[in-house]
Each structure stands twice: as C-alpha cells, then as structure tokens.
Amino acid sequence: MVEHSGLDIMCMNKYSPGASTDTEKKLFTRLKVSLTKRYPQKNAETLSAQYGANLLLIGVSVMLALAQHGTVVREEHLLTFITVLMLVQLAWMLCYMIRRERERSPLPERDAHAGTSWIRGGLTMLALLSLIMDAFRIGYFVGYHSCISAVLGVYPIIHALHTISQVHFLWFHIKDVIKKYETFERFGVIHAVFTNLLLWCNGVMSEAEHFLNNHRRRLTALGHANHTTVEVEPQCNCSTSVCSMFSTSLYYLYPFNIEYHIFVSAMLFVMWKNIGRTLDHHTNHKRPSTRSSGLLLGPVLGLLALASSITVLVVYLIHVEKSVQTREAAVSMFYCYGVVMLVCMCGASGTGLLIYRMEDWPMDTGQNPSRALDSDLLLGSSLGSWLMSWCSVVAVGASQSSPSYRWTCLAYSLLLVLEKCIQNLFIVESLYRMRTDPAGGEEGSGSVPEIFSVASSMVPPYDGIVNRAYETQDKRCGPLENEAHENRQVYSRKCSGVTLPVENSLNVTPGRKRQVLKNITIFLFMCNISLWLLPAFGCRPQYDNHLEQEMFGFSAWSTVLNVAIPLNLFYRMHSVASLFEVFRKV
Amino acid sequence: MVEHSGLDIMCMNKYSPGASTDTEKKLFTRLKVSLTKRYPQKNAETLSAQYGANLLLIGVSVMLALAQHGTVVREEHLLTFITVLMLVQLAWMLCYMIRRERERSPLPERDAHAGTSWIRGGLTMLALLSLIMDAFRIGYFVGYHSCISAVLGVYPIIHALHTISQVHFLWFHIKDVIKKYETFERFGVIHAVFTNLLLWCNGVMSEAEHFLNNHRRRLTALGHANHTTVEVEPQCNCSTSVCSMFSTSLYYLYPFNIEYHIFVSAMLFVMWKNIGRTLDHHTNHKRPSTRSSGLLLGPVLGLLALASSITVLVVYLIHVEKSVQTREAAVSMFYCYGVVMLVCMCGASGTGLLIYRMEDWPMDTGQNPSRALDSDLLLGSSLGSWLMSWCSVVAVGASQSSPSYRWTCLAYSLLLVLEKCIQNLFIVESLYRMRTDPAGGEEGSGSVPEIFSVASSMVPPYDGIVNRAYETQDKRCGPLENEAHENRQVYSRKCSGVTLPVENSLNVTPGRKRQVLKNITIFLFMCNISLWLLPAFGCRPQYDNHLEQEMFGFSAWSTVLNVAIPLNLFYRMHSVASLFEVFRKV
C-alpha cells in the first residue's frame, strides 16, 4: 500500500525518524481519500474500452477454436459464455432502469441525435424476427432434447429475454446522457456494446459456416471438388416432425438477427460516447421533417431496382446449382445486372454531389458523436468490400482462364469501388450540411437556429418518459415552420400550374433541388436494400466464379470473404439507415 | 453538365420557353463558379481518406496474390507499383517544399506537439539503417543482375532517395499546419501516409515469409513435419562473393525498416489531421523539460531487464534449433523469464497509477490530435496481442497434451493481457495530466499557462527554418523556470543532506512523486525495448510451443500470428515512444 511512495518514506525515515509514523498516517488518509474520490473520466473510458475489447477477444478465440471442429471446445462452451454475458447485461439494465425510475425528479439530459424514433422502430422489427428465430431454436431443442446439451435450450430463452429488455431499454433510455455513477455506467454500457458485438460475430460465423457447407455440397454435386462437409447433426431422431423445417428456416432469419445486433451495438456505442458529455444546446434539437411532395421518379426507379434484384436472386439461386453451364450463365447475369445497377447508383450520387457543388448551403460543424460515428462506420465498413473488389481486379488481370464473365466482372469490381466512394461522399456531405429553411433559401438559415437556441435555454428539454425531446420547442417554432411549408407549397403549385417568371424560378431552385435530392436519396435507399438482399440470402458470385479462388487459393480467398462479406452487409444496411436520415434532413 | 438540375429545367422549359436559354446560361455560370470555389474540407477529408485506403488495398491484394507463389503475379509487379507510389510522393514533397520556400514571408502556423525533435532524431537513426538495407539490396542486385528483373535494382535506389527526402521533410515540415491549397495538400499528405503504410505491409510480409520459411526448415530438420519451403532463389550464380552475406544481413535490418515506415505514417497522419486546423494557443506550446535528478533505481533495473532479454534471446535462438528436448527447455525458459518481467512491469505501472490516484493534478483537455492518435494507436495495437493471448489461454485450457511449460504459458498469457491494460492506463493518464510546476505544486499550475498564452499572442511563433517553435516564449519564461529548477534543487539537496521538518517534507512530495514516476517510466521504457527485441529478432515461442497449433490448426494459427505479431511489435515501439514523451512531461 505504501509502496507507491517508497522513496518519499525512505527519505523521511532517514532524516526525521520521530515524525515517520505521523507522516505515514497522513499518507494513508490521503490515499484513502483519493481512492474514493471521482475517477478521471479519460481513464474510465480507456479502462472500460479495454474491458470490452477483451470480452470480445475471448469470444473470438473460442470461435476460432470451434472453427477447427475439435472435440474439446464445443458450441456449448461458447453459448455458455455468451449466455453469462447476456445475463450480466440484463442485470445491469435492470439496475439502471430501477435507478432512473427512482430519481425521476432531476430532469436527465438527452441527446436528440442518438437513436431517432424511426431507427428504433426498424430495430424493433428486426428484434421481432430475432424472437421468431429464438422460437425456432427452442423448437429445435425440444425436438432433439434427448441428445443435445441443455445449454442449447437455455440459450434461446435467455436470448429472447435479452432481446425484449434490450428493445425496451433502447426505446426509453438510449438518448440518456449519463452524469451519475459515470464509471460504473461506462462499464455497463460497454459491456452491452461488446455483448452485442459478440452476438454479431457468432451470427456471422454460424452463417458463414452454413453457407460454406452449402457451397461445398454444391461443388461436390457438380463434380468440381471432393470437399467433405463438417456439419454436425444431432445423434438422435427428432421427436417432433418439424425439426428440419426449424433448422432450415433458421438460416433465412440469420441476416436479420445479424443486423439487429450490429445496429444495437452502434447505438449503445453512441450512448457510451455521450456519458458525461455537456450538450451544446445550439445543435441539440431535432429538426421537424419537411413534407415529401414531388416524390415520383426516385421511388419508382427504386422499386424497379428492388424488383429486379429479387428476380435476379431467385434466378441465380436456382441456376447456380444445376450444371456448370447454367452456373456460368447465372454468374454472367449477376455481373451484368450489377454493372447496370452500379452505373445508375453512381449517376444518382454524382448528381447529388453536383447539386451540393452548385449551392453553398452552410456546413454544420457542431459536435455530434452519433453523426461522427456514422461517417466513420461508413468508411470503415467500405474497406472490406474494397479489398474484395481489388482482389477481383488482380484475379481478372492475371487470370489464365477466360470465362465469359471475365470483363464484366472487372467492370463490376471497379464500379463497386467507385460507387462506394461517391455514395460515401454524398452521404457524408448530406449529413454535414446544415438544413436551411426551404422558403428562405440560404438567407433563412441564420435566423432559425437562433430562435431554437433561445427556446431551448428556457424550456426544459424533457417532458415525460416517451422520447419527446425538444418537442416543446418544435411546437413553439411551429408557426414559422408552417409558414415555410405554405410558402413552399405555393411555389410547387405555381410550378406545376402556371407560367413562372424567370427570376422567381431561380429563387425556387433550392426547393426544387431539395426535391431532386430527395428523389436521389430514396432511389439510393432502395438500391442499397437490393444490394443487401442479394448476398444476405446467398447470392455470392465471389464463391462461384472461381477466378479469385484460382489466384488466391481456397483458404486465403474464403478468409478474405468471411471478413469482407459481413462488413459489406453491414455497409449496405448502415447506408440504408444513413440515407433515411439524409432523406429526413434534406 | 446540366443533368443535375434536370427537373428544374424541364419545369422551366414547359412553362417559360422563351426564358429557357437565358436560364441555362445562368445555371452554367453558377455551376462554373461553384466548381472553382473552395471545396468543403469535410468532403476533402473523406475523399482523400478513400483515395489512400484504396491505394493500400490495391497493394494488399497484390500481396495476397504473391503469397500464393503463382507464376503470373510476381514480386516485380508489387515493387513496380510501390516504386511508382514513391515517385509520386517524391514529386509532391518537392512541390510542397518549393512552394513553402517561395512564400516564406507569411509565417506558417506550426503544431508544437507534432513530431518532437527526439522522435525525429530516432526516426533519422531508423532511416540510416534503412539506407544500409537499401545498399545491401543494391549489392544483392549487382550480384545477380544477369538473372533477376531490373525492377529489383531500381526499387532500392528509389527507396533510398525516398528515405532521404522524407527525413528532410520530417525535420522541416512535419509541424506545418497547412492552410493553403488544402484539398491538394490533403491528397499529397494522405498519399505519403499510405505509401508508408504499404511499405510497412510489404516489410511485414517479407519478414513473416522469411520467418515462416525458417520455421518450416527447422521443423523439417527436427523431423516434426514435412513442409516444403517455397523460398525463391535466383536461377544463376552470384557474380560477387558476398551475395549470401547481403541476403542474410538484410533480415536483421528488416525490423528497423518496418518500424521506420509505420512511425513515419503515424506522424504524417497527424500532419493530415492538422490541415486547416485552427491552433489553440493556450495549449500549443512546448513545455521545457525538467532536469532528471534522482534517477537511479529505474535505469538500473531497466538495464538489467534489457541485458537479461538479450541473454534469453541468444539462448533461445541457439537451443530452439537443436533437438526436441532443448526446444522444450528453451520455451520453458522464455515463459519463466516472461512471467517475471511482466510481473515487474505490472507492479511498476500499478504504482504509477496509485501515485496519480493520490494526487489530483488537473487533467489537460485541450485539443491535440497527436496525443489522441497516440492513445488510440496504443489501444488499437494492443488488440493483436490480446487476441494472441486469449487464443493461448483457450489452447492451454483445452489442450490434451501437457508439456512442462503448460501452466507458465497460461500465467504468461494472462499477465500479458493485464500488463498491457495497466500500461495503457498509465501512459494515457500520464499523457492527459497537466504538467504542474515542480516547485509550486498544484497551485503553480494556473499561472504558468497564462504567461505562456499571453506571450504566444505577442511573439511570432516561428523563427527560422530549424524547428524552434516557441523557443522565444520559452526564453521569456526562462527566469521563472530557472527559479523553479533552483527551488527544486534546493529541496533535493536538503533531502539528501539535512533534516527536514515534516510540514516541508509533505510539501515536497509532489516533486518526490515525480521522481518515482520518472523512475517507473524509464524502467518501463527499457522493458518495452526488451519485449520488442525478442520477437523482432526471431524469438517467437507462439510458433514453437505447438499448443495453439494443435488447437487452431497450422493455417489459422499462422494467420492469427501474421496479423498479431506485427501489431505487437508496433505496440512495443509505440509505447517506447509514448513513454519517452511521458518521461519528458512528468
């Protein structure tokens, strides 16, 4: 205990022996006081991040051992570990909610940007699908209960409980800016973040393994290779008649479960970043959404893209299993479809960027952890798919065989890189643009935030348990907003009905441009959903075209894909969410 | 060109046909104006980051293809690509320096925290070793010039040129805060960052391949396995007699070259982050370093650790090659040594943290990209080694064989996790603590920065090409500082000579504590150098203990190691640099 100041004490002992016990006492009291006092938050941040990272890494190392299909480390061990983590998270959430309930009186601060209601709604949908998955898992366990470990039955029950309470937590507490017991809560939140990340990893691993097994089976059926499948089947017969139905449908629900966990962990991460933060009331208010008139081209083209993607998906999955010729045709079809799709998306995002170049709407530089995380995640998750694309380019360039899809594959890969670059730019620019008043154009932008900020300093920012942060201010500013809407509607009506003088039409352009932007956004939104659907449900030509596999070898290439495909899926879902944010903002 | 506002124009054409050409002209001018005007910096940041990431990924995908040792993609292709990147960087640096030279008059802003002189000194040393490596490479090329590609001769020449100009750039421009042609310079700097990262990757890959080949050869010699080595030897005889000497010594220089490139890219990244930044003059000044009296225990123990590490390294490398028994003994010895070392390091860092808990020196919350990057990199690079440790823990826990080093391996792995956690906490806390005046204790901390900030607003922050930012202020504050030094020396003399009253000795404690901290820091500094030396020069028991390899399989485990070991090496070097910073600050 006194080791920390050994030198001091030595020095004192030597030259003032009489006073030494007195000094030691004083030192002890000082140490005691300092250990109970407030822990610096920078350290709490580092410490909790390290704790969380290690939790995840323990899980990952068990997964790596599992992937070898040895006899010692089995799935039960991993599931037990995850179950324990979920139980700890449940306990923390319960504690947190009870404490919040008790100390209702002092109004807690809330970050209006974290977890908007539509994103929470989306997550609730995903959570429902996860619950169905849990039900299937329980059914599967009941069928085989005589020969599989009890952990496989406990896990889905706890997972269902975890899902329900987590959704409740997200609805009522995700915006909280924690200012009490910061160090303790930091650990709780980061525990939740990494528990969800681990659940994501587990989902990704199960899904990848299932896909690889299917792929191997297909290759063997086509006479391509003689890989042995390593899927473990229970040793006994199913006691109910629907076991195979359960295990098959499970894999159609995996993609939703995977997205659910990664999104929750991103939201909780924002909550963690917000702990102890002092909110800037100038920027912390929700902007009311504008009416969406003049939306036609975007949604129509988007629906077209979505429909064609579903067609491609079905055709691909049927044809890729039949024979070598149909497989080649399916892969060719996919690449052609992809090229068309990506060209359209590049065009749309590029147009959006050009519009931004023409207008100088001001940039919003306020602090906003949620937005900063959004842009970082977009860039970070693009890396996986870029690596995949560049590998394809190298493989096409150096390939000695020349299948029919060789050059479309090259075009597809290059376009994929380009499309992600432009789309990222478009989304980031949209998120960072200040929203100006549609009627007033650039001039109006200065005054509205002024009013908001004055209002927010007078009105309590919280009214009730349902998340209505800043609703009061919104109402207060209502008349101004309504006026703006009316102005805009007048303009639209003029444009669609009567002749407009040129001066006026030039004034109108910001509003018109916004409509174009809204159309672009909704189109990109649909396209990203399409490009999520395809790989999520098994359309992965990177496995079937054999170009890359020849160049990099099966094990290296499937390692790359096992990392890159989940990242790519996350990228698509995340850009869907960001584009929705953009849509509401423009 | 007008596609971006298609809807506007359609709308206008329909209802005011006469005015359409006029409007289009106006739109054109507007577009022209807006395309030439200043590009928003948030976008430039995203765009340049995407450019850099893609450069790196192209390189990585070529490396992946190379790792398969096919006939199509050869080393020449990779080297050509890297050479081109280096040439582009050279051109940019030349442009930049010439422009800076011309517009000397307006004093450029400089970030005093970026690239301190001792870190540039260290880099210069590493650069010299890299130059020797280039010389060896040229020698090797001359020897085999008749049968190897000319690219292998051009590459080291360009690399040497690149190294020299880069070091020059680091000395004179790394602190620059760029405010002109921001978008262009952003691309230049990020190009330099990613060129160095790619050179780092290339170094890491060559080094890992060389090590793996050695390892395979050793295993085959011990009769353990029958791996075939895939090292490519030139097809002709060497025309000079020292070719083998060149190629052997090359591998002893690799570790230095690798560290050189990763450090340069971290420094350039800080420069990139600084582009367009408005410096906060309150925090932007270098603190003069304190005198280092009372340093004894730390350096002595540190040197002891260093000496024992070198002994362990030599003994390990000799014994691991001999027989299965000596190999086991060598691995056991390594783990015992590691456990002792890590326990000492944990104790030292823990003591440091306790001292911080006892004092409440204020935290420095000023913006400082360099420091933020330092802490992020520490945490990020720990991940690799943590994953490795947890894999070892899983392997030991589930292993069916039980070699003599089984439980020391477990202790070593757990201690490694703990040591990195505590050390990270210690370094981060030290970096974020405000330095208080040693004589005045906590009270003095308020006044000195005041004087600094006043001075910095009056005195130009730049005097001459050599990096003497804020030297003037330092001089101005000289008397005060000197007084402080004198006060401290008086205290030290008192402490070592005459009896001190207790009240006074309690006042002295902050100074004493600082001495303890300095000792701890220097000890940790030496320990980290030791732990860098061991894996850098081939002491990697993770390959030789066979526990993990049994559990995870050779390919999965060597993939983990190929990622984790370079990260771990970087972690050690980076904490050496951070600890030096801490040493100067305490």
Image: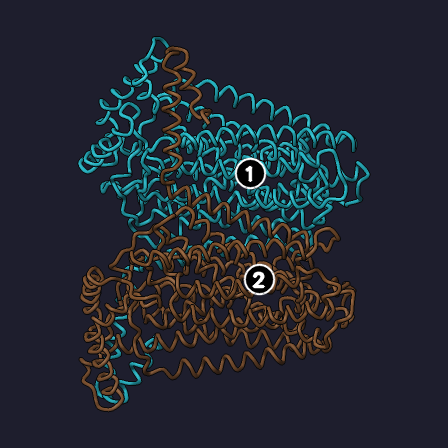
Chain colours: A cyan, B brown
Q: Is residue A126 left or right of residue B452?
A: right
Residue denoted by label 2 = B158
Picture quadrant of residue B585: bottom left
Q: Amino acid at mark 2?
A: Ile
Query: Quick check: A20 above or below B532?
Result: below
| Residue B266 in sight in this render | yes
Left or right of B167 on screen, residue A146: right
Q: Nearer the viewer, residue B290 or A169?
A: B290
Tell which of B133 and B296 is nearer to you: B133
Residue A395 percent across, percent down from the top left: 68, 45
Name the element at disc 2: helix
| Residues packed near mark 2 inside 10 Å, few (<14), some (14 to 19) or many (20 plus) | some
Image location of residue B321, percent across then percent down: 70, 76
Counting from the top left corner in percent of width and height, residue B107 is at 29, 58
Considering depth in this image, is A126 or B6 the residue closer to the camera?
Answer: B6
- Residue sitting at x 46%, y 43%: B47
Residue at 32%, 16% in the rendered image: A502
The numbered disc on residue B299 is: none
The answer to whether the residues at label 1 and label 2 have Cβ atoms under 8 Å apart is no
Q: Which residue is mark 1?
A: A569
In this view, A436 is above or below B271: above
Q: Residues within 10 Å of mark 1 (few under 14, many from 20)?
A: many
Observer-side mark, 1 or 2, equals: 2
Residue that sits furthest to the bottom in the current view: B497
Q: Is residue B523 above or below residue B400?
A: below
Q: Amino acid at mark 1?
A: Leu
Question: Quarter of the image holding residue B543?
Answer: bottom right
